[in-house]
Amino acid sequence: MAKLALPGPVISLLLLFFFSGEISMLVNGQKAWCVAKPAAPQHALQSALDYACNYADCSPTKKGGSCYDPDRPVHHASFAMNAYYQKMGRNQWNCHFYNTSLISLADPSYNPCCQFVSGGSGPPLPQEKENIINFTCGILKECSEIQEHGSCYFPNTLINHASFSMNLYYKTDGRYNCDFNGVGLIVVTNPSKPICLI
């Protein structure tokens, strides 16, 4: 099977959760943040912001605060949602906000003055039977790059392997399916490494 690599900014996947009936936690020490979904309606983001700020410190998002700029609902809501998520224990249900947020494994801090706090370990993972890697690789019949000795085997983590297989499936399927039961997200930053083209 030919490698699917595109020049310039490539739409790829960021794995946010990995569903497996066998695994209950991410790798120890994995940091996680709760952020607003970019496509969430502004009124829903404002409601989430108001709710989160009742329980967490949102003063950095106020005018003159270190996280005020850019003055956009999605940025302010992300900061507030994450502050709430961290304060309440970093459980999956602490980052729901009526389905306007998601858990990210990438640090959403966008400048040195506005740092998003993160806890020590990642979020608990939902228990489901579907294994995304087996599903995507079973349909594609080609995931040799994430097998031992493959160019994308390292880092040998579920997140890395699932991100690769989900992205390959997304590209092969005509760029229509990126949801994967709520665990996939389209991003514009290419996550490829020099020896591993995703």
Image (spheres, rainbow, N blue to C red):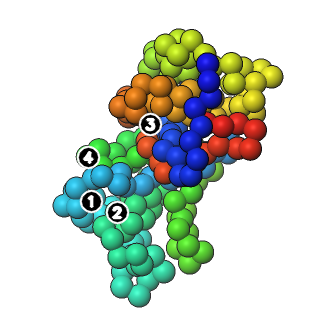
Amino acid carrying label 4: it is Tyr
* Mark 1 to mark 3 CA distance (whole Å): 20 Å
Look at mark 4 in the image and give the residue it sits on.
98
Look at mark 2 in the image and give the residue it sits on.
74
Q: Nearer the viewer, residue 140 or 104?
A: 140
Reading the chain from its start, which is encountered first: label 1 or label 3?
A: 1
* Mark 1 vs mark 3: in front: 3
Could you tell me which secondary element the residue under label 3 belongs to? loop
Look at the numbered discs 4 and 3 and tell me whether their residues touch, using CB distance below 8 Å: no
Quarter assignment of residue 150: top right
Could you tell me which secondary element the residue under label 2 belongs to? helix
Reading the chain from its start, which is encountered first: label 4 or label 1?
A: 1
* Mark 4 to mark 2 CA distance (whole Å): 15 Å
* Mark 4 vs mark 1: in front: 1
Q: Residue at x 33, y 71 (%)?
A: 72
Give percent across and percent down for residue 170: 45, 30
Q: Which mark is residue 184?
A: 3
Please tell me how crowded label 2 is: few (under 14), some (14-19), or many (20+) other residues with Cα within 10 Å: many
Can the viewer see residue 27 in this picture?
A: no
Look at mark 1 in the image and give the residue it sits on.
45
Can the viewer see residue 93 in this picture?
A: yes
Could you tell me which secondary element the residue under label 4 belongs to? helix
Q: Going by the image, does 127 lie left or right of 151?
A: left
Give percent across and percent down for residue 180: 41, 28
Look at the numbered discs 2 and 1 and tell me whether their residues touch, using CB distance below 8 Å: yes
Q: Give the answer, above or below, for where 14 lies relative to 126.
A: below
